[in-house]
Image (cartoon, rainbow, N blue to C red):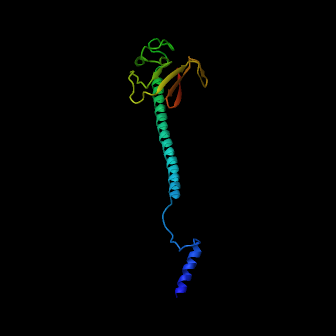
Amino acid sequence: MFRELRRERAIATDARGLGGPARRHRSGLTLVELLIAIVVISVALGGTLLLSRQTVLRSADAMIQHQALVVATAYLEEIMLRAYLDPDTATLCPASEVCRALYDNVCDYAGLDDAGVVDQTGSSVSGLGDYRVRVDVDTTANLGGLSGSADVLRVDVRVTHPTGVDITLSGYRTAS
């Protein structure tokens, strides 16, 4: 019996190839495995944060672009509601009025350049100070069979923002 026990012990020692008594399997992580896991998690987390940052930046761009479109639409609508000819002189494009509150015809808006969004009375609109609004009135425009200042004017409203947003809306105002 003593011989059998010795023989089993020798087989267990030879199977491991260690030349000593058989060792039990230990559970846990080695230092190398732990370092590799930390590197993999760091790379994955870095990629996720970069993607999140880009998403946040792009969502702000959409809001700025939408605001610029609303501003351009508001300016264009204000201009298009004005008279084609100056009500004071019944002429096309006389000298512009001194302030925007007195603008009474489309041509008064030619060359308007607002740094920051301004309402019709000249008051700044809060929260929209970074936008720049420029208006151009083209008296040589063509629209279908209409051409020239006697028939049609083209109004271009351009709104820009420091983030690179640049929107131009155009509208045509006819004499009749």
Q: Is residue 37 above or below residue 53?
A: below
- In the image, 4 versus 71, the foreground residue is 4
- In the image, 119 versus 26, the foreground residue is 26
Q: Is residue 13 above or below residue 102?
A: below
Most extreme residue toward the right is 145
Residue 71 in picture, x, y percent from top left: 46, 29
Q: Is 45 positioned to the left or the right of 142 in the image?
A: left
Query: Dividing the picture into quarters, in which one does residue 98 lie?
Result: top left
Most extreme residue toward the bottom is 1
Residue 88 in picture, x, y percent from top left: 44, 12
Q: Residue at x 47, y 41 (%)?
A: 56
Number of marks in the rendered image? 0
Report if residue 124 is visible in the image: yes
Report if residue 176 is visible in the image: no
Residue 170 in picture, x, y percent from top left: 54, 27
Q: Residue at x 53, y 53 (%)?
A: 40
Q: Is residue 43 above or below residue 101?
A: below
Residue 75 in picture, x, y percent from top left: 46, 26
Q: Residue at x 40, y 19 (%)?
A: 101
Q: Residue at x 49, y 36 (%)?
A: 61
Q: Is 140 positioned to the left or the right of 60 in the image?
A: right
